[in-house]
Image (tube, rainbow, N blue to C red):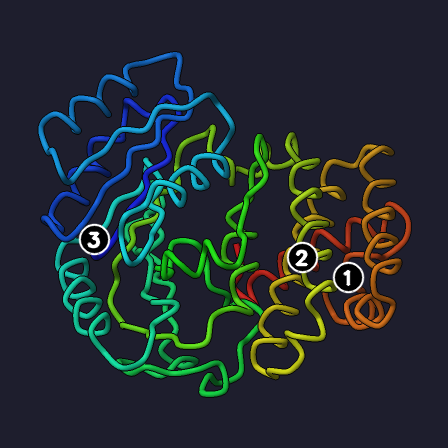
Amino acid sequence: MKLLTITVPCYNSEAYMRKCIDSLLKGGEDVEVLIVDDGSNKDRTAQIADDYEARFPGVVRAIHKENGGHGSAVNAGIENANGLFFKVVDSDDWVKEEAYLKILDKLRDLAGGSQVLDMFISNFVYEKEGEKRKKVMHYRHILPVDEMFTWEDCRHFLKGHYILMHSVIFRTKLLRECGLKLPEHTFYVDNLYVFEPLPYVKNLYYLDVNFYRYYIGRGDQSINEEVMISRVDQQIRVNKLMIDYFVGHKSEISKNKRLFQYMRNYLEIIMTVSSILLIRSGSKEHLDAKKELWKYLKGKDGLLYLYMRNGIMGRVMNLPGPGGRKISVEGYEICRKIFKFN
């Protein structure tokens, strides 16, 4: 068994996937790199994946599948993983070697310990095109550093501090046992990836190193605001799935105060992002969709609806009329600066 499986979802990624894969190969024989070619059809992604497999047998495996979207590629990685631990690295991102090797050393130590590690957390860096100063997302003021801990040991999570896909390494068996199955042909499923497994996570470890480099700068990236508005139906789908999951597991989640607080805050941020995208679009169809989304939340859990609707972000997102919507957009920008999300 390998120590760590890293899945690299690729879709027409010829222009940048080599930088990603080359950074992962520095992990050596303890690492398994799964290059998941998600039905690429416009470039040499498939051939590049096969070439890496031929050059690095026993380390790289190329998996070719019909196009199903990012979530489908992650699902394929989980299904095919031979590693004790599992990580996703997107094909336009990369990892820093020094931090990478420290993480592998720590995973080796923890794998042989008396306690079972469920989730490993490290920092990531926003590699934003054109910016010299790189923003680092760290957790040192919230999570215990360099020790095994549980949710009860965490400090108060601020609304802007949430754990993204870039931050986490999961125990592979946990992902399978929790039944995680990301929806196909849907963007923004990374929010589900770092949400649904959490009630199953008992033991965590945080290493304060800047490991993952998250590239931002391509115009066609899914996080580009114009792209997000064009795909807002998929954002809403993920949002509703998160509502369903939280409400369906609420009795279990609420047994742990810190976990409940964290997952509720995360859901509140996603509700805010969905709302502002629909407001920014400004079409009647999208404004109606925003009302329907909040109505959906109310129908699923009235108390949760009241909590979010009466919170600062809920109030800002639901001001009436054109003037109110203008204030909502301005208020969103203020909230984003205060809570430091997106």
Q: Position of residue 329 (x, y in %)?
A: 71, 51
For residue 332, which numbered disc appears in the image? 2
Earlier residue among tags 1 and 3: 3
Identify the residue at horizontal 69%, vertical 42% (top origin).
237
Give the CA separation, mark 3 to mark 2.
47 Å
Q: Position of residue 164 (x, y in %)?
A: 45, 57
Amino acid under label 1? Val
For residue 74, what is the image quadrant?
Answer: top left
Mark 3 or 2, which is nearer the eye?
A: 3
For residue 92, what is the image quadrant?
Answer: top left
Frontmost residue, 252 versus 90? 252
Amino acid under label 3? Met
User: Label 3 neighbourhood size at 10 Å, few (<14), some (14-19), many (20+)?
Assistant: few
Q: Is the residue 206 above or below the residue 242 in the image?
A: below
Frontmost residue, 81 versus 337? 81
Please count the marks in the image. 3
71 vs 77, left or right, is right
Secondary structure at badge 2 equals helix
Identify the residue at horizontal 28%, vertical 58% (top origin).
84
- Marks 2 and 1: CB-CB under 8 Å? yes
Q: Is the residue 264 above or below the residue 6 in the image?
A: below
Q: Position of residue 321 (x, y in %)?
A: 90, 48
Q: Position of residue 131 (x, y in %)?
A: 33, 48
Secondary structure at badge 3 equals loop
Tag 3 residue: 1
Give the CA separation, mark 2 to mark 1.
7 Å
Q: Is the residue 250 above or below the residue 46 in the image?
A: below
Frontmost residue, 2 versus 121? 2
Identify the residue at horizontal 51%, vertical 36% (top origin).
222
Tag 1 residue: 316
Amino acid under label 2? Tyr
